Image (cartoon, grey):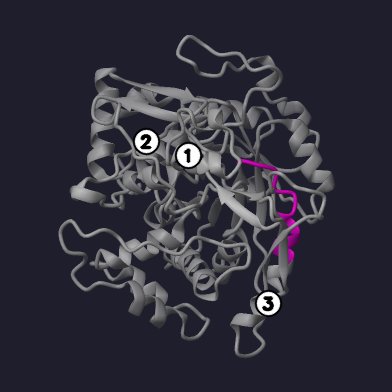
Amino acid sequence: MTAIEAYPPIIQGGMGVAVSNWVLARATALRGQLGVVSGTGLDTVLARRLQDGDASGDMRRAMRAFPIPEVAPEVERTYFRAGGRAPGEPYRLLPLHRIVPQRAREMLTILANFVEVHLAKEGHEGPVGVNLLTKVQLPTLASLYGAMLAGVDYVLMGAGIPREIPGALDRLAGHEPASLTLDIEDQNGDGPRTARLEPTMFWPAATPPLRRPRFLPIVGSSLLARMLAKKANGRVDGFVVEGPTAGGHNAPPRGQVRYGPRGEPLYGERDVVDLEDLRALGLPFWVAGGVGSPEALARAREAGAVGIQVGTLFAFCDESGLDAAYRRGVLEAVSRGDVEVRTDPRASPTGYPFKVVQWDGGSGAVRERICDMGYLRTPYVRPDGGIGFRCASEPVETYVAKGGERDDTVGRQCLCNALLANVGLGQVRAGGRREPPLLTAGDDLPAIARFLKGRTQYTAGEVIDYLLGEAAA
């Protein structure tokens, strides 16, 4: 077996909050491809699944396998509702993450990531990864540790420059204290602030070391890949190189940003990744963004890639966590030729462009400005020297009072609440109003009509057969 053959040619993308759930990752890994769970917001996902009654029992079964004593029973007592919530009853919110973490909050994050990876890996030897956003810093170390306790095989991270993650993986594998430097706005020269995790605080006795997963940063340029390969604080095992046609958050265009007639940022030749330069690094890489076809897989391999990372096709398969009604509605719109994907430069409070699916069942919803989950908040230095948090999607006057620029709030939407609504876990607001969805997909969403052939339902296995079968032929 050659080095390239030792890796799976297909990575199922880590999409949204619980779109790439354990069911989808497991179905992919069972076929020998890299199944990936989205680690973003999994603490809220677990708490809401328990509040909805955990009818299948999967959450509680996985919780019973969690190795740190007393954590799972306490979480079950706090959040589980036999039979689920009453009609119209809101979900119980979690405390917001802090720089100095609350032990119960930290343990819930560790447990939630363990549960999702444990279920994805249950009963087979296929590879499973976890995808995290570099931008979402405060839960990162706890998320990584929980996934590692479940034996995660790969860690993938984009939406930022994750140069400190390799070293954190090394230390967490030995249950040693790990830290990440926080990106804080309005720094006043007092030196870096860090988030820390000390695993030995959770264990009553010494515990054997963990296996360190492979680390694959998601990059938008060969320049960034080269920098990480040379300057990260530990081993980088390969890259996913993602073009601007990929769904979710995208890197902004390089150079001076120009906008199209609908206000979308325009990408040019400078944003095309030099695969030959990437290949020269000598590390395995996968190509992502508009590559959901057997021909694209063949082209990627000809360029020296191990294979491709595919999101959109997997996002709308049966095993995906997307609400079934949204899945079906979008696929019906694709079959009619009545769907489009717009790169919205303003929707995400992160400042990264974000791709939004527009179809007749989910366009134009009015969303309340709110920040009650806080994953995408930005830390900043208050005038008194303390650390505060603000989000460009929170109420405008609240954001401005915290020193934010009013212009930064224009067009922003609460992605935290929207992405949970996409997977059927949206909050219930006053008067019984439910959070509306905000679906994301790659630019190639309309083109999957070729794969659908009139269908509005398909499995992850059919996606893999499609990508591998024709490429092999």
**Mark 3 lies on residue:** 209
- Residue at (45% x, 62% y) in the render: 43
Return the residue nearer the eye: 146 or 450: 146
**Mark 2 lies on residue:** 439
Q: Quadrant of residue 385?
A: bottom right
Secondary structure beneath label 1 = helix
Q: Choose mark 3 or mark 2, whichever is in front.
A: 2
Q: Is residue 167 magenta?
A: yes
Between the C-alphas of marks 1 and 2, the distance is 28 Å
Residue 134: x and y in percent read 62, 48
Between the C-alphas of marks 3 and 1, the distance is 49 Å
> Tag 2 or tag 3, which sits nearer the N-term?
3
Farthest residue toward the bottom?
Answer: 205
Amino acid type at mark 2:
Leu
> Which class describes the residues within 10 Å of circle 2: few (<14), some (14-19), or many (20+)?
many
**Does residue 90 appear anywhere in the picture?**
yes
Circles 3, 1 touching at the beta carbon (< 8 Å): no
Between the C-alphas of marks 3 and 2, the distance is 40 Å
Looking at the rendering, the stretch of residues picked out in magenta corresponds to 159-170
Q: Choose mark 1 or mark 2, whichever is in front.
A: 1
Amino acid type at mark 3:
Pro
Q: Examine the rendered structure and indicate whether residue 49 appears above or below residue 455.
A: below
Residue 344: x and y in percent read 48, 25
Secondary structure beneath label 2 = loop
**Mark 1 lies on residue:** 397
